[in-house]
Image: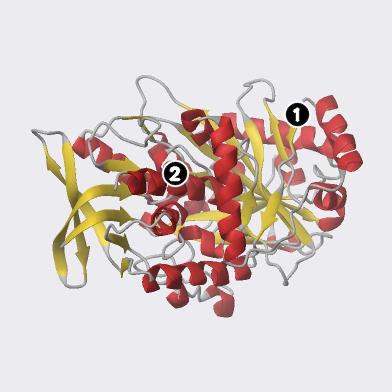
Amino acid sequence: MNTDVAIVGAGPAGIFTALEMLRKGSKKKIVIIEKGKAIENRHCPKQKTKVCMNCKPNCHITTGFSGAGAFSDGKLSLSYEVGGDFPSLIGEMKAQELIDYTDGIYLEFGADTHVEGVNAAEEVKAIRKRAISAGLKLVDCPIRHLGTEKAQELYYAIEQHLLNSGVEILFDCECTGLLLDNDQGRCLGLVATDKHGEFEIRAEHTIIATGRRGADWLEKICAQYNVAHQPGTVDIGVRVEVRNEVMETVNKALYESKLIGYPRPFKNKVRTFCQNPGGFVSQENYDNDLAVVNGHSYKELKSDNTNLAILVSHNFSTPFNQPIEYAQKVGELTNMLANGHILVQRFGDILDGKRTWPKELMQSNLRPTLPDAVAGDITAAMPYRAMINIINFIQAVDAVVPGFAAYETLLYSPELKFYSNRIKMDERLETNVKGLHCLGDSSGWTRGLMMASVMGVQMGRIIAEQE
């Protein structure tokens, strides 16, 4: 098969590359391959069974058109200060311009016009004052909340637009390698596999946009084909759940509070991420049956709880250069203790040095929104350095949000974010291999829906300008 542009992964970065090329009037042929299914064929059975069924060959929550975005809480961060390091590559002003432009595309496809966190200046000022006293930095970022169920509708509309515009999307199709001209140092396309077998897709531009789920795979591809990269940051942490009453002030003023700290004694960067007012804790399955925790927030369906991630950033140096594998081992050990499920423990039990028992969860004001989470002891699997950072950070947040460090506060583990393997690129998104580009969260440059989408828009513009 021959094409002009071959895109690996139908997540936000790949989708918006194709979308922007069309918007710029590009006549180039575009082929997207996606190892998962079309969005209308993605269905998580847990909605009926209430228990994770560990779907094979791929988890429907993390894999398929729009990637994990279809089943996430669907929050679009509207500030260049949030979402990764892509602004440092193209410039902050340029990044903000692209965010505003990309936000407009989301609105065209049905995103809610309401923006959270922009009309409560005095409340935000008071929250920031408490954060400063606690040694934390508050990043107040406007949020456009799609909602888990509404995000699926929006991405379905984008999927149909791409198909109707001539973009070829090959579902249940996996990239297994690249085609290289070693003499010229150029990528000539890729090798793919579907139910019919292996075949080649030759292309002028090959774009890898596999998302966080594909970070480990991309690292292996880089090593195999000598794509210049360097180990990046990997985040290890927990998902915290509290009653809505505890987070009420922050939820109303900001919807999502992004707090950053460097707690003693290690002073690693620790931050909150993906806050879901009235949300639900969820389980996702990665390759090798790795179960990780996440959070969802619907537009209509609400719980009595708010959940958010607390992540500790790990940056490794010589001689160790396998941060993704390190995080996976932490996750595997946690999964082992929970028999393949997510572990949950009360914060007070952690401080008391004891495990949590199922009957104790039923005695609290706070009831878990992940019903098949296994009560136990996450400290038996979490590295000491990360656990101490998490404990001290939670206690600091308690000064900003009283009640956050309550005895009954729930911690779910493992929460892992694979942003590692920073691909070396220039501002035109060129790697050291000509014709090969790497976008989105798996590239190490972005974190989250909006910035991955923005990187795709930039890629689409660069290709369209070459016609």
The amino acid on which the numbered mark 1 sits, given as a three-letter code, is: Leu
Q: Residue at 10% of width from left, 35% of height from top?
A: 182
In-front residue for pair 253/184: 184
Distance between mark 1 and mark 2 Cα atoms: 33 Å
Q: How many other residues sit within 10 Å of disc 1, few (<14), some (14-19) or many (≥20)?
A: many
Q: Secondary structure at mark 2?
A: helix
In the picture, measured across the screen, residue 291 lies left or right of residue 258, that is left
Place of residue 106 in the rendered image (x, y in percent of width and height, measured from the top left) = 58, 59
Q: Position of residue 290 (x, y in %)?
A: 43, 54
- At horizontal 44% and vertical 25% (from top left) the residue drawn is 316
The residue nearer to you, when weighing 108 against 274, is 108
Q: Residue at x 51, y 28 (%)?
A: 88
Is the image coloured rainbow, by chain, by secondary structure, or in one colour? secondary structure
Marks 1 & 2, CB-CB < 8 Å contact: no
Residue at the extreme bottom of the image, as rendered: 48
Disc 1, SS? loop
**Residue displayed at 76% across by 53% down:** 116
Q: Where on the picture, by quarter, is residue 394? A: top right
The residue wearing badge 2 is 458
- Give residue 1's quadrant in the image: bottom left
In the image, 308: left or right of 454? Answer: right
Visible residue check, residue 171: no
Q: Residue furthest left?
A: 183
Q: Nearer the viewer, residue 154 or 51?
A: 154
Residue type at mark 2 is Gln
In the rendered image, which residue does mark 1 sit on?
A: 136
For residue 439, which numbered disc appears in the image? none
Q: Earlier in the sequence, mark 1 or mark 2?
A: 1
Please identify, in this view, whether the residue under mark 1 or under mark 2 is nearer the observer.
Answer: 2
Residue 178, image x, y percentages: 19, 47
Q: Residue 121: where, in percent of width, then height?
A: 87, 41
Q: Is residue 85 visible?
A: yes
